[in-house]
Image (tube, rainbow, N blue to C red):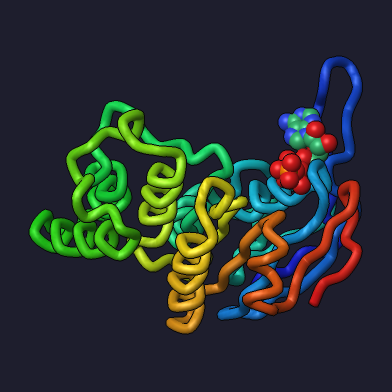
Amino acid sequence: MIHLREVGLRSERGSSGVDVLRSISFDIPAGAFRWVLGSSGAGKSSLLRLLNLSVRPTTGTMELFGVAVPRARRSALAKLRRRTGTVFQDLRLLPELSVFDNVALRLRLDGMPEDRIELEVTEMLRWVGLGRKLQARPPQLSGGEQQRVAVARAVVHRPPLLLADEPTGALDEPQAVRLMQLFLELNQMGSTVLVATHNEGLTRRFPAAAIRLERGTLLTDG
Ligand SMILES: Nc1ncnc2c1ncn2[C@@H]1O[C@H](COP(=O)(O)OP(=O)(O)OP(=O)(O)O)[C@@H](O)[C@H]1O
């Protein structure tokens, strides 16, 4: 359900371009779990940005949920975005909104009734251990707590595609393991899950196939 063929991504930096990703081809079946591995600067975040449609491939073809992305209509892309949850490396929480409202935002945009939102968001935030912080604002939280809000926001609508960019960077080992269990639960319910990480302890503890990048090229897939 994710097909990439010869995908390249070139970013303009000053007057010269940089090949951030080069000739990437792989297929990931629906419902799979993949680690996304590689040293700093290898292109992991860039690959996830392509898959969550923040950027478009410069070359090659990409198909998500049967939609050929470079040619798709805006409405098809909007639908794809709604089916995707992303944990951004820089979190991107809205500092002026409460923890509850940060997580509820997506469900409100989808038109879910407010009483159901109340239940879903509260349960999700309890699950990540933030049941007592519903009304706090992100700047009042620790880095690890903010990261858990970002995870709750990404998974609260049970997206068919979850993309997580270094989601455990600010967490201690037990919290990281707990979040992985949440991701694997989502995966077992049928979501396709990609997690980019440097955390080797975690990849050893949860062995799974990996997309391994090095300086913008694919080393192994599987
Ligand atoms: N918008 C951009 N303009 C120019 N270069 C970019 C841009 N985005 C990323 N790059 C470059 O592309 C390369 C890959 O970056 P990327 O953030 O995808 O790596 P990463 O594997 O996620 O690294 P890290 O593990 O440190 O987060 C880096 O050399 C980076 O400097």
Image point 64% across, 47% down: which residue? Answer: 49
Q: Residue 89's x, y, as percent?
A: 58, 43
Q: In this view of the protein, which residue sits in the foreground, 214 or 176?
A: 176
The front one of 4 and 210 is 210
Q: Residue at x 52, y 53 (%)?
A: 77
Image quadrant of residue 35?
A: bottom right
Give the quarter the ligand 1 occupies.
top right
Above or below residue 110? Residue 31 is below
Residue 135 or residue 12, whichever sits in front: 135
Residue 135 against residue 33 in the figure, above or below: above
For this orientation, the residue located farthest to the left is 115
Task: Name which residue lies at 62% across and 79% down.
Answer: 32
Toward the front, the furthest residue is 173
Residue 52, how many percent across, how many down? 58, 52
Q: Is residue 98 left or right of residue 81?
A: left
Q: Nearer the viewer, residue 37 or 86?
A: 37
| Residue 162, x across and y down, in percent | 52, 63
Residue 9 visible to the viewer: no
Residue 209 seen:
yes
Q: Is residue 3 above or below residue 50?
A: below
Q: Is 27 rendered above or below residue 197?
A: below
